[in-house]
Image: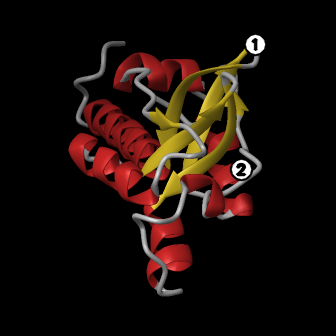
């Protein structure tokens, strides 16, 4: 596990499940789906293409803080759009840079214009921590003379 590992590696490890809703789904129903699946964001799909992302952040900032009703609003009224995405060949480092520069926490992964997975900032941080742990373990073994010659 390294910063140079690709999204393909991460998706093989974490899975490729993508939860999505249509743009006309109520915010309330989208939140219920997110709660059921214990996720922080949903991809918004129209005509088999990603048109937005709806996240807990969108709900907090664009619904609750503005005093709107989640049962009356549709996801398309509060989703983040356009969708920023990456390809299977993009690295962990690439994705961290995209997320940091774009100030986003969820990143769809596409292959030939088809969404094949989604990664969160948490997924990437977990990958990086695991990579660092492996490196530390290897260095400790090398220093202690346990590393094969």
Decide: is 101 above or below 42.
Answer: below
Asked whether, in this view, residue 31 is left or right of residue 82, the answer is left
Identify the residue at horizontal 61%, vertical 33% (top origin).
Answer: 45
Residue on which the image places disc 1: 112
Q: Residues within 10 Å of mark 2 (few under 14, many from 20)?
A: some
State left or right for residue 37 relative to residue 61: left
Counting from the top left corner in percent of width and height, residue 141 is at 26, 31
Give the percent coordinates (x, y) of residue 11. Answer: 46, 22
Mark 2 or mark 1, earlier in chain: 2
Residue 92's disc number: none
Pick the quarter of the image with the N terminus: top left
- Observer-nearest of 132 and 5: 5
Residue 105 figure quarter: bottom right
> Which residue matches tag 2?
98
> Quadrant location of the C terminus?
top left
- Viewer-proximal residue, 90 or 120? 120
Side (left or right) of 24 relative to 41:
right
Which quarter of the picture shows residue 23? top right
Secondary structure of residue under mark 2? helix
Q: Position of residue 18 (x, y in %)?
A: 45, 28
Q: Residues within 10 Å of mark 1 (few under 14, many from 20)?
A: few
Residue 3, horizontal then vertical, whole percent = 57, 37
């Amino acid at each position: 596990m390294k910063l140079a590992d690709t999204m393909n590696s991460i998706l093989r490890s974490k899975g490729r499940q993508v939860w999505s809703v249509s743009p006309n789904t109520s915010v309330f129903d989208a939140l219920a789906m997110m709660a059921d699946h214990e996720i922080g964001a949903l991809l918004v799909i129209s005509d088999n293409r990603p048109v937005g992302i709806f996240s807990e952040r969108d709900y907090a900032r664009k619904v609750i803080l503005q005093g709107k009703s989640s049962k009356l609003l549709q996801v398309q009224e509060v989703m983040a759009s356009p969708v920023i995405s990456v390809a299977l060949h993009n690295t962990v480092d690439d994705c961290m840079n995209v997320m940091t520069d774009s100030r986003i926490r969820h990143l769809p992964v596409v292959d030939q214009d088809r969404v094949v997975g989604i990664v969160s900032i948490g997924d990437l941080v977990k990958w990086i921590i695991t990579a660092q742990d492996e490196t530390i373990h290897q260095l400790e073994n090398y220093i202690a003379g346990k590393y094969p010659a």
